[in-house]
Image (tube, rainbow, N blue to C red):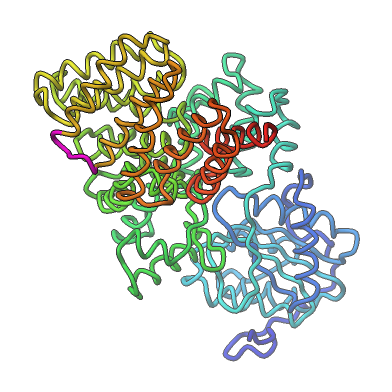
Amino acid sequence: MYESFNNISNSKIYVNSSTFEVQPQLSTTLGKETIIGREKELQEIDERLNNSNSLLLINGIGGIGKSTIAGYYLHSQKEKLDYYGFFEDLESFTVELKPRLKLNSSNEDELFMEALSRLSSLEGNKLLVFDDVKNIEANQDKIEKILALKESGYKILLTSREEIEEIEQYYLDVLTLDDAKELFNSIYEVKDEDVLEEILGYLDCHAFFVEMTAKTLKSKKTLTPKIIKEKFTNGEFSTIKRKRKESFNDYLNELFSFDELDDEEILMLKQFSVLPSIEIEFEFLEDIFNRKEDEKFEDILNYLTEKGWLSSFGNSYKLHQIIKDYIWTNHKPTLSEIDSIVLFFAKLIANAEDIRTANLLKGYIVYFESIDTTLNRIEIYNEKITKFRDNLGRLYYHCGAYDRALPYWVKVMKIREKVLGEEHPDTAGSYNNLAVLYKLKGEYDKAEPLYKKALEIRQKVLGEEHPDTATSYGNLAGLYMSKGEYDKAEPLYKKALEIYKKVLGEEHPDTATSYGNLAGLYDSKGEYDKAEPLYKKALEIRQKVLGEEHPDTATSYGNLGVLYYEQRRVKEGYELMRRVVEIHSKVLPANHPALINSQKWLELMEKSL
């Protein structure tokens, strides 16, 4: 509770004995008198300032638009006010008021108290705006005395990146997408809506950089929205030049500084910069940072929020993309500083080889991609990092996003060729994975040499009777199948099955797959009598080993169902396909190609009943 000015103890009281007219405008400048968007925020600020205790703090990260909205609010209220002023910081308070209030004191402290006394004697509707208030703790006494002016009828609006105790706070978030588009297009019009949304998405609708990016495009003929978007994507945000000697990094350094943070707080921000710029629940952050029930961890998060580095949304925290860019450009983390965060997500994605686990992990893709971006920036390559990317490609593959899996597996292949050599089993695995993707995309000419290369390496390094060699035989056979070259495919399928049975045994998932592949060959050739027992054998193994609700079990049901449909045993086929859709609906995402395909087959069979 702030005391009224006249009740502050141990204060010298100044009385305005001279007679002069005080002009309504108490400061030289009044902040910006124009704004785009923010209608909802302006209304909420007005309601809170009028309905609370006449004090309000607009809080938020640097460059988010606090000054703009505070200045515009003052302009929107001028006609209703008898006195008003916009002070760009606490230091400008007495400097601005001295000539307007004809202050006489020479001592700074006495001048400050004289200003408060003169202000308290003014009557009418009054609004003071204090912009970008800093060093809250050091200026606590001065702030309290200013806020006491509310007892003299003043409404006081402050902006700061920091929090001020006992004052209602209004957190100013990023612009809405529509407001960001309007602001951008008011400066530089972008006709391609998708490109504009990608630019704004990267900027996370940060008001200052939305404006700066638009102004940069307007002033430079050599830049286009597509080039800007590519620079953002390639991590070149900070290098973009507004003018010859003025880059975006100069703006970042104007907005942010680590000077007032200790080593532990800086490390926390560096580790946070590895994560995506989204709201992350506190409980998940405890897991990521391995600081469960650690009070100090929570204290640091809250302190960084109070100082305007993190944004807090109830139980969640977020590091804005622009602050991430500041950190990576000016305080680039080392691998040792962020290794624990990378390791957490590397362990999380380690089970992506299993399709069901992969689909459970799809909600974490935004985190995995952020980790990958981090690894690109630190430019360190080792097997742990390579395996992480391999698993990320596998995750996309299992989710049916083949185009998104491809660049990761290409990257992994190139690293393994360079680090491990071309005749290493892991390199062969990369050739095989890429070939699988090219085959699924119908690019057989790209897939075949990769399949052959993988087989050649595995035969040489692992031997003829190794499961991976059998996999290569089966994959190459599958390619020939897709091309309709059945005579080439059949001996390879048989060879694969022979190896699996000998090395892995009859009751192994890979053996079941091999039975199914050979059955598929006979099915395609119309040799249904040969195909049916092999399909049944594959189904029997998968039911026993993988369980009834596994995607591979569903595949066996589906293969057998289609076979029955082809033999005009439609009712039998329909019942099996209905089971396929039931399993797929439980274990696969709604947009997965396997689910979509099984639904189409079910519709087709239903029409034929």
Q: What's the residue at 62%, 23% (across, down)?
A: 217
Residue 367 picture location, percent across and down = 42, 47
Residue 16 picture location, percent across and down = 77, 77
If the image is split into quadrants, where does the C terminus sit?
top right
User: Is 607 situated left or right of 142 in this image?
Assistant: right
Magenta region, residue range: 502-507
Whether the magenta-drawn stretch holds residue 157 is answered as no
Residue 202 visible somewhere in the drawing:
no
Residue 514 picture location, percent across and down = 29, 30
Residue 115 visible somewhere in the drawing:
yes
Q: Main secondary structure of the magenta part?
A: loop
Residue 272 picture location, percent across and down = 39, 53
Q: Nearer the viewer, residue 566 or 351?
A: 566
Q: Nearer the viewer, residue 491 or 104?
A: 491
Whether the magenta-drawn stretch holds residue 504 is answered as yes
Q: What's the residue at 38%, 38% (across, down)?
A: 536
Q: What's the residue at 65%, 35% (across, down)?
A: 603
Residue 414 vertical position relative to residue 83 in the rendered view, above or below: above
Q: Nearer the viewer, residue 416 or 236?
A: 416
User: Is 517 situated left or right of 19 in this image?
Assistant: left
Residue 608 vertical position relative to residue 89 in the rendered view, above or below: above
Give the image quarter of residue 40: bottom right
If the image is split into quadrants, where does the N terminus sit?
bottom right
Residue 487 vertical position relative to residue 546 in the rendered view, above or below: above
Q: What's the residue at 22%, 33% (across, down)?
A: 381
